[in-house]
Amino acid sequence: MLPDKSCPEEGRSPRHQTKIQELSILAEKVGCTYTQLTIAWCLKNENVQCVLVGASTLEQLYEHIHAIQLIPRLTTGLINEIEKILDNKPIRMPLQR
């Protein structure tokens, strides 16, 4: 796995840094990188319409591609753990007629 440099700490709020740290620990438990976990979560998330990633190196491209293999392992329990850490799940408003 690549060292995760996707989240520089400078300029981030302590609350944001805590969330990144918790997600990184969860990713380690799952056996992937923070980047792979976030890409897989975005791809599986029904509220996300499009996922754009940019790779500067071939290694980063491979890391992004391997995130796709993680999608089947994102169980409801794991998604709930991620959602609990993020604490920002959108609430869909009912359609008005």
Image (spheres, rainbow, N blue to C red):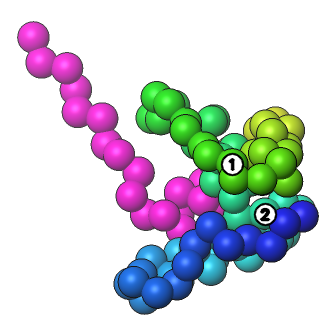
Seen in the image, is 16 located left or right of residue 34?
A: left
- Bounds of the magenta span? 77-97
Q: How many labels does the image show?
A: 2
Q: Where is residue 47 in the image (x, y as percent from the top left)?
A: 45, 35
Q: Position of residue 67 (x, y in %)?
A: 78, 45
Seen in the image, is 10 located left or right of residue 43?
A: left
Which residue in the structure is indicated by mark 1?
A: 55
Image quadrant in which you'd find residue 52:
top right
Q: Distance between the residues labelled 2 and 1?
A: 15 Å
Q: What element carries label 1?
A: loop
Image quadrant in which you'd find residue 28:
bottom right
Q: Position of residue 71 (x, y in %)?
A: 77, 39
Q: Which of 53 and 50 is in front in this view?
A: 53
Residue 57 in sight here: yes
Q: Does the magenta stretch include residue 78?
A: yes
Q: Residues within 10 Å of mark 2 (few under 14, many from 20)?
A: many
Whether 93 is drawn above or below 39: the answer is above
Residue 33's label in the rendered image is 2
Q: Does the magenta stretch include residue 70?
A: no
Amino acid type, callout 1: Ala
